[in-house]
Image: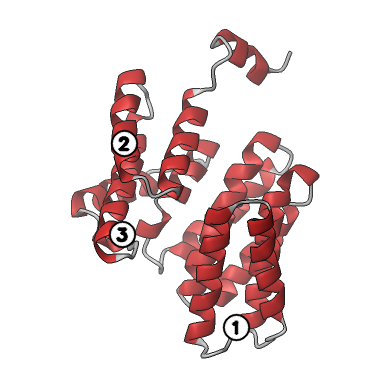
């Protein structure tokens, strides 16, 4: 019996604290459900009052609540609008990471908007040096793929195309199996964006195709996000879609 199955049985067929936390914060956050997110914080404190990960997980919830509060007021999500104390605590935790684990990857992924763009290349240099050791760890691939996707988005919109291009082959390597098809579609979306930013306007059709695939599979949130990213890039370049 594999260790993860043994632990699943030991928990009486319940998911782990980490799985429950990240699936919940992802679900409520992706649906912009501010009320559910606030309730989730109380549920987390009630369910895991003595968790060793409590500090960083509460910070992730607080950060997302701040983002969504600002979003409902302005229609935009901007990391810099969070309270200074939350930002300081998050950055302190990031600086104190010694060896990158799955928990650290998840934390970094959820708070990436608070990382100074000038620090991003250094963080990804550290990450790309350690991520390869997880290439055969199937349970970790969705976490790593999400991290790479968020990183690509931030670097592209920060006009750091050269740094974003370094991530693309890693995302390619982590999305080749059949059970990574969702993330594979994101790979082709970003591959088209990179091609577009390098002057190939034929890549617009390829990017739109990946958006339609998201819609066909009823991933409406991701279709909307990808469409918004593409339109923003086309607007900045003054190109008609």
Point 27% across, 51% down: residue: 66
Point 44% across, 43% down: residue: 107
Label at residue 71? 3
Q: In the rendering, at what x and y percent does residue 126 appear?
A: 54, 54
Give the quadrant of the N terminus: top right
| Disc 3 element | helix
Label whose residue precedes the other's in the sequence (3 or 1): 3
Label at residue 58? 2
How would you rate the neighbour count of disc 1 (Cα within 10 Å): few for under 14, some for 14-19, many for 20 or more? few
Q: CA distance from mark 2 to mark 1?
A: 41 Å
Describe residue 59's horizontal placement relative to residue 128 as left or right.
left
Residue 171 shows in this picture:
no
How would you rate the neighbour count of disc 3 (Cα within 10 Å): few for under 14, some for 14-19, many for 20 or more? some
Foreground mark, 2 or 1, reads 1
Q: In the rendering, at what x and y percent does residue 55 appear?
A: 31, 34
Q: Do labels 3 and 1 touch, CB within 8 Å?
A: no
Residue 185 shows in this picture:
yes
Label whose residue precedes the other's in the sequence (3 or 2): 2
When asked about the image quadrant of residue 188, the answer is bottom right
Above or below, 113 against 161 in this view is: above
When asked about the image quadrant of residue 34, the answer is top left
Q: CA distance from mark 3 to mark 1?
A: 26 Å
How would you rate the neighbour count of disc 2 (Cα within 10 Å): few for under 14, some for 14-19, many for 20 or more? some
Give the quadrant of the C terminus: bottom right
Point 27% across, 65% down: residue: 74
Label at residue 241? 1
Q: In the rendering, at what x and y percent does residue 198 appear?
A: 64, 84
């Amino acid at each position: 019996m594999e260790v993860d199955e043994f632990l699943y049985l030991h928990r009486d067929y319940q998911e782990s604290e980490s799985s429950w936390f990240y699936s919940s914060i992802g679900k409520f956050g992706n649906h912009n459900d501010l009320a559910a997110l606030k309730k989730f914080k109380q549920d987390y404190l009630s369910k895991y009052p003595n968790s060793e990960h409590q500090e960083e997980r509460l910070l992730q919830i607080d950060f997302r609540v701040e983002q969504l509060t600002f979003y409902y007021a302005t229609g935009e999500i901007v990391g810099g609008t969070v309270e200074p104390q939350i930002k300081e605590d998050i950055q302190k935790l990031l600086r104190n990471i010694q060896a990158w684990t799955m928990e650290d990857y998840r934390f970094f992924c959820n708070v990436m908007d608070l990382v100074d763009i000038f620090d991003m290349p250094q963080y990804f240099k550290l990450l790309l040096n350690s991520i390869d050791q997880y290439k055969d760890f199937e349970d970790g691939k969705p976490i790593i793929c999400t991290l790479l996707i968020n990183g690509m988005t931030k670097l592209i919109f920060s006009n750091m195309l050269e740094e974003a291009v370094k991530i693309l082959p890693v995302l390619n390597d982590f999305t080749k199996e059949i059970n990574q098809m969702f993330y594979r579609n994101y790979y082709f979306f970003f591959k088209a964006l990179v091609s577009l930013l390098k002057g190939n306007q034929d890549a617009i059709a390829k990017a739109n195709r990946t958006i339609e695939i998201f819609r066909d599979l009823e991933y409406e949130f991701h279709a909307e996000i990808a469409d918004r990213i593409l339109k923003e890039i086309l607007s900045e370049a003054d190109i008609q879609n």
